[in-house]
Image (cartoon, grey):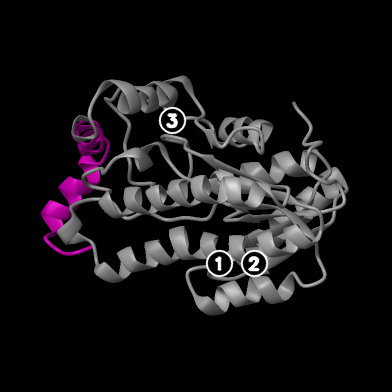
Amino acid sequence: MKHLNHIKSSGWALVTGSTMGIGFSYAVSLARQNKSLVLVARNEAKLTEVAQDLAQRYDISTKIIATDLSTQAGLDKVISETRGIFVDLLINNAGKEESGNFADNHVDEMLNSIALNCSAPLVLSHHFSALMGENGGGSILFLSSIVAFQGVPLIANYAATKSYLLVLAEGLAPELKQKSIHISVAAPGFTRSNLSPQINFNGTPFKPLDADFVAQYTLDRLGRQLLIVPGFINKFLFFAGKYIQPRRMSSFAFGQVFKMVLKDKMATQKMAGVKT
């Protein structure tokens, strides 16, 4: 395991969506490297459980903030409750997706996804990058996705939000480098997590990545690579989409993949005949 020696040991890491999936794996990996943690999620009981476990196992300082980052009040709470704490590593991990036919998803849910996936990372990055710049620098990691490089049927809004993070990170990297702030953006593919529990891989050739692998792989490259794509298959998909086939073909191919893995959910929607 590589040590994050390019990140100041005296600072704290703030991880959003830190009680499950890749976010939890980031928290564990950082705790192993004796990084103090600010853990942010909605479930206060789960946050307390995770914080106490990591503090006991790795003898680190932890702070929890139970809040909904899709709301302005939730973002204000994070900013307020981290006053006096130097956060030199921000991991914008929290996110949500809605999948299935576009017309079958409530517009309020899609707007909520935009708020959580796009607005929250923007606001937090704006706030903490200013503090990092005043205190000698730091690092910011955005969690994008392999679907960010083209439009994808059946998860169109989710893919679009992840494209926003990719472009935002690409633009911020050279600008904030002048203040010794390192920017990276991770683009994992299918990963074992609770983000989309209705995805079914049975009967498909796809094997989801392990969340611990994704977290450690990206942390090892944080600040050294702008774009981090974990996993061989994901690297191949990125390379093919960038250099071999046109975006239109990539959109079609990804659409066929999601038609397969969402077949159970789509069948349920069709039988119910109601919006989800």
Residue drawn at the location 82% of the way across and 70% of the way down: 84
Q: Quadrant of residue 151?
A: top left
Is 63 part of what is drawn in magenta? Answer: no
Q: Of helix, strand and loop, which one carries label 2?
A: helix
Q: Which mark is residue 127?
A: 2
Q: Answer yes or no: do the residues labelled 3 and 1 have beta carbons within 8 Å?
A: no
Q: Which mark is residue 147?
A: none
Q: Amino acid at mark 1?
A: Val
In magenta, the rendered stretch is: 250-276
Find residue 160 and report its horizontal and vertical position in percent: 33, 51
Q: Nearer the viewer, mark 2 or mark 3?
A: 2
Residue drawn at the location 31% of the way across and 63% of the way down: 110
- Quickly name the residue at label 1: 123
Q: Is residue 177 above or below residue 274?
A: above
Q: Residues within 10 Å of mark 3 (few under 14, many from 20)?
A: some
- Quickly name the residue at label 3: 208
Is 254 part of what is drawn in magenta? Answer: yes
Q: Of helix, strand and loop, which one carries label 3?
A: loop
Find residue 88 and report its horizontal and vertical position in percent: 75, 53
Residue drawn at the location 24% of the way across and 24% of the way down: 245
Residue drawn at the location 88% of the way across and 48% of the way down: 59
How many numbered tags mark residues here?
A: 3
- Upstream in sequence: badge 2 or badge 3: 2
For the residues labelled 3 and 1, the Cα–Cα distance comes to: 31 Å
Q: Answer yes or no: do the residues labelled 1 and 2 have beta carbons within 8 Å?
A: yes
